[in-house]
Image (cartoon, helix red, strand yellow):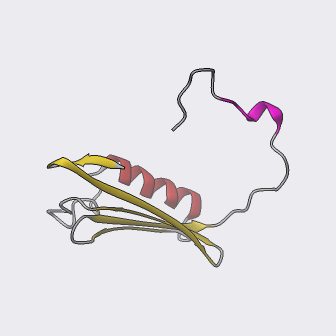
Amino acid sequence: MKYAITPREDGGSIRIEGRTRGNMLELTVIDDGPGLRDGNALIEGRGVGLRNTRERLAVLYSEKHRFAVLNSHPGVRIEIGFPLEKAETGPLPAASIKSPAAGTRVA
């Protein structure tokens, strides 16, 4: 997928990776944009979405989580880790399974 990454008009790419390691779920989001001009900009909490994510992880998992925003030259790399919680197995209730409406395009 290509998304416009400021200030690049030609777009860029965003890669999302996930894996389990021991009892942790680790997610990584990487873009190939210009990176952080001021490496401390996100650490100081000026990004609302990332700040909200950081605060939510702290509330849910206390010190048992990881959240890091890093310059990856080019781009930015965000690393998130939190305890893996396995869902109970079994069939989903019929009411929770939804089919797309007729004529709806599914990506």
Residue drawn at x 29%, y 46% as measured from the top left: 3
Horizontal arrangement in the rendering, residue 86 relative to residue 60 (left or right): right
Residue drawn at x 82%, y 56% as measured from the top left: 89
Task: From the top left corner, tell me how far across and down residue 63 is, in percent.
Answer: 53, 70
Closest to the observer, 90 or 88: 90
Furthest residue toward front? 103
Residue 67 highlighted magenta (yes or no): no
Closest to the observer, 16 or 37: 16
**Residue 66 vertical placement versus 92 (above, below):** below
Furthest residue toward right? 90
Task: From the top left corner, tell me how far across and down residue 41 is, in percent.
Answer: 21, 60
Residue drawn at x 56%, y 70% as measured from the top left: 19
Residue drawn at x 37%, y 53% as measured from the top left: 51
**Residue 65 vertical placement versus 91 (above, below):** below
Specify the segment rendered in magenta: 93-99
Residue 98 highlighted magenta (yes or no): yes
Furthest residue toward bottom? 22
**Residue 82 vertical placement versus 13 (above, below):** below
Horizontal arrangement in the rendering, residue 52 relative to residue 82 (left or right): left
Instruction: Quadrant for residue 84, please give it.
Output: bottom right
Q: How many labels does the image show?
A: 0
Task: From the top left corner, tell me how far across and down residue 62 is, in percent.
Answer: 55, 65
Closest to the observer, 34 or 66: 34
Horizontal arrangement in the rendering, residue 66 relative to residue 72 (left or right): right
